[in-house]
Image (cartoon, helix red, strand yellow):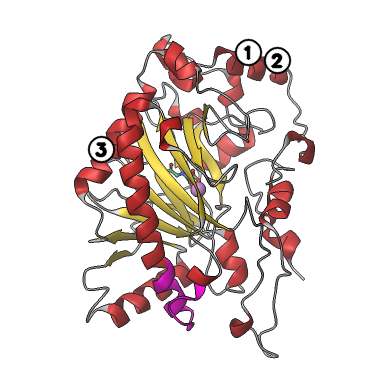
Amino acid sequence: MDISDASRTTTQTVTDYDRAKEVQAFDDTKAGVKGLVDAGIVNIPRIFIRPPEELVEELTSHQTNFQVPVIDLDGVRGNNLEEIVDQVRAAAETWGFFQVVNHGIPLNVLEEMIEGISKFNELDVELKKEFYTRDQTRNVRFNSNFDLHYSRTANWRDTLTISTLASTNLDPNEYPEVCRDAAREYIKNVTKLAETLFELLSLALGLKAEHLLEIGCPKEYILLCQYYPPCPQPDLTLGATGHSDPSFLTILLQDQIGGLQVFHDNQWVGVQPIVGGLVVNIGDFLQIISNDKFKSVKHRVVASQVGPRVSVPCFFMGHNAEIPKSYGPIKELTSAENPPIYRDFLASEYFSKRFSTVLDDNSPLHQLKL
Ligand code: OGA
Ligand code: NI
């Protein structure tokens, strides 16, 4: 997949300091945001501080009582299928987000995954450094801010990535040992849940249950193990800048700290953690192939003095690495009255558009419109 530096044009930001130099110095520590916190900083470095116009806008936003829909998957293989499909359709069409409970993944598998990721981040920094790289050809890599060198504002988080995109022969022996068993078990379970969800989404689109499986939607994945250290000045930065996901579907495991927000009805709505629950959201690719029936919705993570927070989104990417496949609006969903809105695209093309701009509001969806 082409997400190399060559495909990017760095977005120029006007600053009165040598941002590139400070960013490089931070990257060179290979200790991530946790390294700053461990060093006892009181004021966050300016590379993390959001532009003044954003901070002013934030002061005018207000809280709401909205709640992302919660869908109980109990009985999905039995009497409750039709009701569940209706709920999935309603959520995918409006929120683009829902939470699932009784999804079949044992609670200990979820808890051990979160614990494993905490333990990895808490390793001696010298051990973590062995994994620190921006080399996209590595299946397993650790770094802080995948877009550090071209984003406008760095985010308050560190990430361990496990991805099948560089090579579908993902060897669990490459995972850090502290989280190896937990990650292997979680991946096995979450990919199985993804298949169930793609069946439900196919039915919700009025297609046969296997449709999204047959076009390979759950085929490859990127697991991002996110670690958000406590932040001494949370109002000045973000854990993750607002974005929509570059995937067909994302399944997110989070601990009980909270901080994920979804942009709904012109406001940021918090996604309340549920013990044993998982957050599911529609990504850009599914919005495109559903011809805008399902919505890929913008979301972000706020920073907090409470933490660390751990979350593990798994992005289901379709066919990418070995046999790249082009995707476009599903024929059965378009007609003379409802013509395709998008042209066919390769994930690599999508990524080169996405990474030619900063993370915020960067969805290439509009560039793929016919
Ligand atoms: C992401 C994301 C949310 C979270 O990594 O794309 O939206 O809660 N993460 O970590
Ligand atoms: Ni996301």
Query: How far, Cα to Cα, is label 2 from label 1?
Result: 6 Å
Label 2, on which residue? 21
Which badge, 2 or 3, comes first in the chain's sequence?
A: 2
Type of amino acid under label 1: Ala
| 212 relative to 270, above or below | below
Residue 159, numbered circle: none
Seen in the picture, residue 40 relative to 27 is either above or below; the reply is above
Residue 45 in percent (x, y) is at 56, 17
The residue positioned 60% from the left and 18% from the top of the image is 27
Badge 2 crowding class, 10 Å Cα cut-off, few under 14, some 14 to 19, many 20 or more, is few
Location of the C terminus by quadrant is: bottom right
Q: In what element is the residue under mark 2? A: helix
Mark 3 or 1, which is nearer the eye? 3
Q: Residue placed at 31% from the left, 31% from the top?
A: 116
Q: Looking at the picture, which amino acid does disc 3 mark?
A: Glu
What is the span of residues highlighted in magenta in the rendered image? 198-212
Q: Is residue 280 above or below residue 169?
A: below
Q: Is residue 201 magenta?
A: yes
Q: Does any portion of residue 21 appear in the rendered image?
A: yes
Q: Is residue 343 above or below residue 244?
A: below
Q: CA distance from mark 2 to mark 3?
A: 38 Å
**Residue position marked by numbered label 3 in the rendering:** 112
| Residue 178 drawn at (x, y percent) | 33, 26
Spatial CA span between label 3 and label 1: 34 Å
Residue at (27, 41) in percent of width and height: 256
* Of 322 and 43, the residue lying toward us: 322
What amino acid type is highlighted by mark number 2? Lys
Determine the main secondary structure of the stretch shown in magenta.
Answer: helix
Q: Which mark is residue 25?
A: 1
